[in-house]
Amino acid sequence: MSAHVPDVRDADFDAAVLRADRPTLVEFTADWCPPCRQMVPVLEQIAIERPDLGVVKLDVDRNPATAARYGVLSMPTFLLFRDGEPVKQFVGARPKRWILAELADVIDAGPARAR
């Protein structure tokens, strides 16, 4: 079973991530980045296993404004957003269990505020 991890763009980032009704993990990625490609199946598994967590990716080469807005310089960079604010950040490919453990306090804290 494969889940689609949607792409977000500069133009729809605010609507898709900042105004999301659940915590959302954003992978800042690039086509030329081998560790980013390594993360694809991991993110798909997380998206399947945690429907209470949004999982999206943003290509930094095609969407430089959002990458610059959050000071992203290395790929992959992961930012977890809740209620429109970044609340966690980590850089580099990580195993699924590490990611879920790192994000547990935010995604298990209950629903984000209604918008």
Image (cartoon, grey):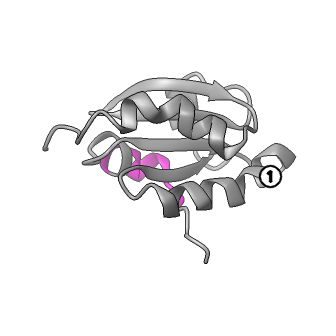
User: Which residue appears farthest toward the left when viewing the image?
Assistant: 114
Which of the 4 image quarters holds residue 91?
top right
Q: Identify the residue shown where x is 61% and y is 54%.
A: 43
Could one spot residue 36 in this view of the protein? yes
Could one spot residue 65 in this view of the protein? no
Q: Identify the residue shown where x is 65% and y is 46%.
A: 96
Image: magenta residue range? 6-15
Q: Is residue 59 magenta?
A: no
Q: Position of residue 10 (x, y in %)?
A: 47, 46
User: Which residue appears farthest toward the bottom when viewing the image?
Assistant: 1
The total number of labels drawn is 1
Name the magenta segment's main secondary structure: helix
Q: Identify the residue shown where x is 59% and y is 35%.
A: 78
Q: Position of residue 5 (x, y in %)?
A: 55, 62
Q: Position of residue 69 (x, y in %)?
A: 49, 26
* Residue type for callout 1: Gln
Q: Position of residue 55 (x, y in %)?
A: 49, 52
Q: Mark 1 — residue?
A: 38
Which of the 4 image quarters holds residue 104?
top left
Which of the 4 image quarters holds residue 105?
top left
Q: From the viewer's side, name the closer residue of 78 and 70.
A: 78
Q: Residues within 10 Å of mark 1 (few under 14, many from 20)?
A: some
Per the image, label 1 sits on a secondary structure element best described as helix
- Residue 37's place in the image compared with 85, above or below, is below
Q: Left or right of 17: which side holds 30? A: right
Q: Identify the residue shown where x is 40% and y is 49%.
A: 53
Q: Left or right of 31: which side holds 87? A: left
Q: From the viewer's side, name the closer residue of 78 and 65.
A: 78
- Residue 4's place in the image compared with 87, above or below, is below
Indicate the quadrant containing the N terminus: top left, top right, bottom left or bottom right.
Answer: bottom right
Q: Left or right of 69: which side holds 74? A: right
